[in-house]
Image: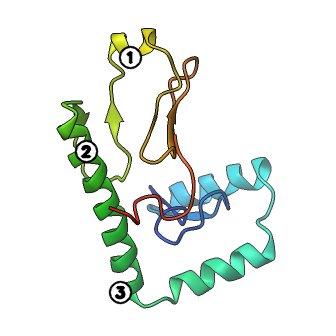
Amino acid sequence: METYTFSKTFNMAGWRFGFAVGNASIIRAFKKLHTHSYSTVFGAIQDAAIAALNLPAERITQLTAVYHQRREWVLRRLAALRWPARDAQGTFFLWLGVPPATVRRSLPVCCCRKRIFWWRRALVLAQGGKDLFASA
């Protein structure tokens, strides 16, 4: 069985919408489990998902290119700082270690025009704002 989410491909993160494909008997069992453990999805979200599936393929290609450009921009900046980052393919997430010295320093450390922050206790890297990398 394979599962697919609309979160990133169609900018529907947080809407909790997706589907599963695979062997018919496995899908039937999954459907039975799902029926007893989950409520239905709001109709407007279902309508949005249908509209997303009807978008031209080039829209997905364009969005993928934007994610790739942003990821490469961050990788270049991290490399300039000599901060190792795992160059995982198939995702726009970056996995990087937090050097022990960074944890001991005064945090939060702010960079990229005050849009990326480190929080000392959670050690979370988060970005905020629209078009974070537009000035790149």
| Picture quadrant where residue 18 is located | bottom right
Instruction: Give whichever of 28, 67 is nearer the camera.
Output: 67
Q: Earlier in the sequence, mark 2 or mark 1?
A: 2
Label 3 secondary element: helix
* Dot 3 alpha-carbon crowd within 10 angstroms: few under 14, some 14 to 19, many 20 or more: few
Q: Is residue 39 above or below residue 42?
A: above
Label 1 secondary element: helix
Q: Position of residue 83 (x, y in %)?
A: 24, 30
Residue 58 tag number: 3
Would you name the residue on which mark 2 appears? Answer: 77
Q: Is residue 46 left or right of residue 84?
A: right
The residue at the far front in this view is 113
| Picture quadrant where residue 105 is located | top left
Q: Earlier in the sequence, mark 1 or mark 3?
A: 3
> Mark 2: which amino acid?
Arg
> Mark 1: which amino acid?
Thr
Q: Is residue 85 left or right of residue 51?
A: left
Q: State how far apart marks 3 and 2 are (Cα).
A: 29 Å
Q: Earlier in the sequence, mark 3 or mark 2?
A: 3
Would you name the residue on which mark 1 appears? Answer: 102
Please name which of the two marks, 1 or 3, marks the residue nearer to the observer: 1
Q: Report if the CB atoms under discs 1 and 3 are less than 8 Å apart.
A: no
> Mark 3: which amino acid?
Glu
Can you say which quadrant of the picture contains the N terminus?
A: bottom left
The residue at the point 52 percent across, 83 percent down is 53
Q: Position of residue 123 (x, y in %)?
A: 50, 23
Please name which of the two marks, 3 or 2, marks the residue nearer to the observer: 2
Q: Report if the CB atoms under discs 3 and 2 are less than 8 Å apart.
A: no
Q: Position of residue 65 (x, y in %)?
A: 31, 71
Q: Report if the CB atoms under discs 2 and 1 are less than 8 Å apart.
A: no
Label 2 secondary element: helix
